[in-house]
Image (cartoon, rainbow, N blue to C red):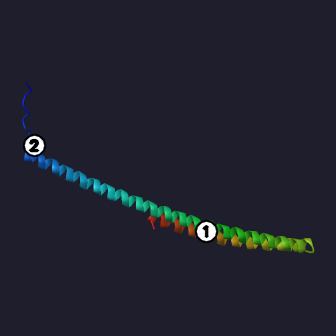
Amino acid sequence: MAAPKLPYDVPPEMRDFAEKSVEQAKKAFDGFMGAAQKAVETAQGSTESARANAEQSTKKAMVYAEQNIAAAFDLAQKLVRAKDPAEILQHQGEFMKAQMASFQAQMTEFGAAVQKAATSVTKGK
């Protein structure tokens, strides 16, 4: 004959301890999930901000390129119409001076935009 099964009672202290442990584990897990959710949202916000800033920078670079190409075509037309080498040199000098000023302004503006973008990304805005 098999031995009769004895009922096994869990002491109330052990049951209380187990319940408290489960509650604490659930609270810790909920806190972890909340922090993870917040981190994901922050990363998504930063990613979106970086994408928008990259798009703005690309558009700005395209505008600069168009301006520079237009200036080069304008110079080419002036050179074709020039009557003598002195006029060619004059147009070339004016072009170089204007392009240097334009380039400096473009880089200053572009640098400020990049700095603003970097600041907004690092702040998560």
Q: Is 13 drawn above or below residue 85 in the view shown?
A: above
For image coordinates 78% across by 72% down, the residue present is 95
Residue 8 location, x and y as percent?
9, 39
For image coordinates 24% across by 55% down, the residue present is 27
Question: Where, quadrant-wise, is the N terminus in this rendering?
Answer: top left
The residue where tag 2 is placed is: 10
**Furthest residue toward front:** 1
Question: Where, quadrant-wise, is the C terminus in this rendering?
Answer: bottom left
**Could you tell whether 27 is left or right of 73 in the image?**
left
Residue 37 location, x and y as percent?
37, 59
Q: CA distance from mark 1 to mark 2?
A: 72 Å
Q: Amino acid at mark 2?
A: Val
Depth check: give the residue in front, 78 or 70. 70
Q: Tag 1's secondary structure?
A: helix
The total of numbered circles placed on residues is 2
Displayed quadrant of residue 10: top left
Residue 92 location, x and y as percent?
82, 70
Displayed quadrant of residue 100: bottom right
The residue where tag 1 is placed is: 110
Q: Looking at the image, can residue 96 be seen? A: no
Q: Amino acid at mark 1?
A: Phe
Circle nearer the N terminus (1, 2) = 2
**Furthest residue toward right:** 83
Give the mark toward the camera: 1 or 2: 2
Q: Residues within 10 Å of mark 2 (few under 14, many from 20)?
A: few
